[in-house]
Amino acid sequence: MSEGKFGREINPCVLIAIDGSLSSMNAVNYAVHMTGLIPGLEFDLLAVLPSVPPHLEQTARTDGHMLGRLKKLKRANIEKAELFLAKAKEYLIRHGVTEERIRTKFRPRIGGVAKDILTEAEQGLFDALIVGRRGLSRTQELIMGSVTSQIVQHAVNVPLWLVDGKITDPKILVAVDGSQSSLRAVDHVAFMLGRNPEARVAFLHVTPKFQTYCPIDLSNTETQWAGLAGEIEDLEKEFLHEDEVCIDDFFRQAAQILKQSGFTPDRISFIEKEISMGVARTIINVAREEGFGTIVIGRRGLGSSSFLGGVSDRVIRRVEGLAVWLVN
């Protein structure tokens, strides 16, 4: 948990949603690899118990036989959760995490799995929530994708680390557009990695196209726009110039944030790419081509026309074999 946010310096602490599925173990595996980048990282492992059908609870109030069966069912659910949590904890310990940095907890399902996980993350003031891409297991009678989608949609008060597959590459790529949301993403990275003197950060800015905001086809000289070609060309130059000025100013601010967290200039790099087949795909392609295991992105960008406003959602939908840090 960050010193600036809560006024005290303690180790970063993440909450990992555990359900015994391969996807949740992929989240644990990813967290293990993050310990190489984040000194002193601590872990809370959370399992949400399956709910009991309300009509069984009602019947058990007057039926002693049903009450006994219900108690056995609840006990079995707890034992299964404890087994999942123990397996995840053992995995962390086996990969070098000391036991005092691991806590486990199960809680009853109250408002729905996604809501219960987010409630725990927000009330516990965790620095990040880690979930596997596929969500919770079928044994809990949940559609994993819908749970993950709900978490993505409602995780507004805690950074979300979404893990797709088994990821081992520690390189981190921060996709930025010059917005305040991007600066908050930088601040999150700075806090997480700042105490590691070997950590490196790469920024990616995808240069926008003027046609994204003004989709005029000038290829046909017979169109009504032909006479405005010169003016539109000037507007495009001004548009690109303003984007350059904006991102240069952003990079200066980002570098200052990282410097205050202990980063030296040689550990910070910048990548500029022209948009090819869409901003989200460009970001994902750069991450794959350059060997990054994690993409960091702000949820909202510069107003209604900003790239990162909707790009973050498209990155999450399309990314495979990578982790995404979504920061509000």
Image (cartoon, rainbow, N blue to C red):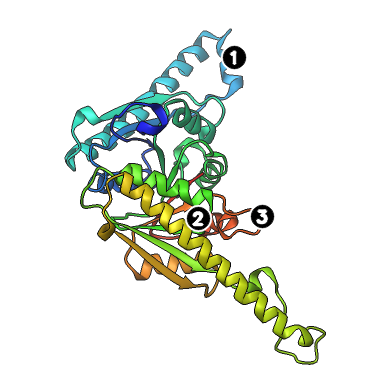
Q: CA distance from mark 2 to mark 1?
A: 43 Å
Q: Residue at x 32, y 66 (%)?
A: 291
Q: Are marks 2 and 3 in contact (CB under 8 Å)?
A: no
* Amino acid type of the residue that numbered disc 2 sits on in the rendered structure: Ile
Q: Are marks 1 and 3 in contact (CB under 8 Å)?
A: no
Above-or-below relation of 192 to 279:
above
Q: Position of residue 311 (x, y in %)?
A: 55, 59
Q: Secondary structure at mark 1?
A: helix
Q: Position of residue 73 (x, y in %)?
A: 44, 22
- Point out the tag, 2 or 3, that comes first from the N-terminus: 3
Q: Residues within 10 Å of mark 3 (few under 14, many from 20)?
A: few
Instruction: State left or right for residue 100 relative to residue 64.
Output: left
Q: Residues within 10 Å of mark 2 (few under 14, many from 20)?
A: many
Q: Secondary structure at mark 2?
A: helix
- Work out which quarter of the rendered image holds the N terminus and state it: top left
Q: Which mark is residue 59?
A: 1
Nearest the eye: 314 or 208: 208
Can residue 264 be seen here?
yes
- Point out the tag, 1 or 3, that comes first from the N-terminus: 1
Q: Position of residue 297 (x, y in %)?
A: 47, 53
Q: Are marks 2 and 1 in contact (CB under 8 Å)?
A: no
Q: Residues within 10 Å of mark 1 (few under 14, many from 20)?
A: some
The residue to which callout 3 is attached is: 304
Q: Residue at x 60, y 14 (%)?
A: 58
The residue to which callout 2 is attached is: 316
Q: Secondary structure at mark 3?
A: loop
Q: Residue at x 52, y 64 (%)?
A: 245
In front of the other: label 1 or label 3?
A: 3
